[in-house]
Image (cartoon, rainbow, N blue to C red):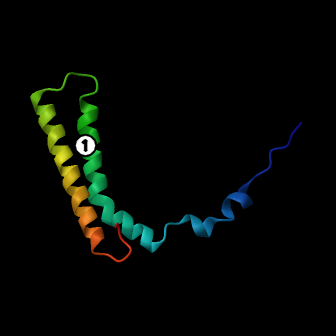
Amino acid sequence: MSHIVTVQDAVTAFEDFMEPTSAELDAIEREMPVILADVELLDAQIITIDRTPSELDARRIRRARRRLLAAHRDHVNGLSGQAGGAA
């Protein structure tokens, strides 16, 4: 019979390192408009998975795609002014 041992010590050994840093939280906050726009596009696409897209669905997808591209553009343009940003 094999005994089940806990791995609590192994799991919690890195507990201090598992939390996001302030810099990581700031990066997520800066990316939030892109994330939300991407979710909006996915929602519009999911709606049309099991049916033929209507004209309204097609407009919703186009609008969401434009919002995602605009949010991504704004995010990348914002990074260009920062030291160490995207080159």
Q: Give the quarter of the figure containing the N terminus.
A: top right
Snapshot quadrant of residue 4 = top right
Badge 1 density bin: few <14, some 14–19, many ≥20, Cα 10 Å = many
Where is residue 64? Give x, y as percent: 19, 45
Q: Give the quarter of the figure containing the C terminus.
A: bottom left
Q: SS at mark 1?
A: helix
Q: Amino acid at mark 1?
A: Leu
Q: Residue at x 38, y 67 (%)?
A: 27
Number of numbered discs present? 1
Q: Residue at x 25, y 43 (%)?
A: 41
Residue 46 higher or lower than 78, as above or below:
above
Viewer-closest of 45 and 69: 69
Q: Residue at x 15, y 32 (%)?
A: 57
- According to the image, label 1 marks what residue? 41
Where is residue 20? Give x, y as percent: 49, 66
In the current view of this chain or complex, which residue is farthest to the bottom?
Answer: 83
Snapshot quadrant of residue 9 = bottom right
In the current view of this chain or complex, which residue is farthest to the right?
Answer: 1
Viewer-closest of 13 and 3: 13
Q: Residue at x 48, y 71 (%)?
A: 21
With 21 as the anchor, is 26 left or right in this view?
A: left
With 68 as the anchor, is 23 left or right in this view?
A: right
Residue 84 higher or lower than 2, as above or below:
below
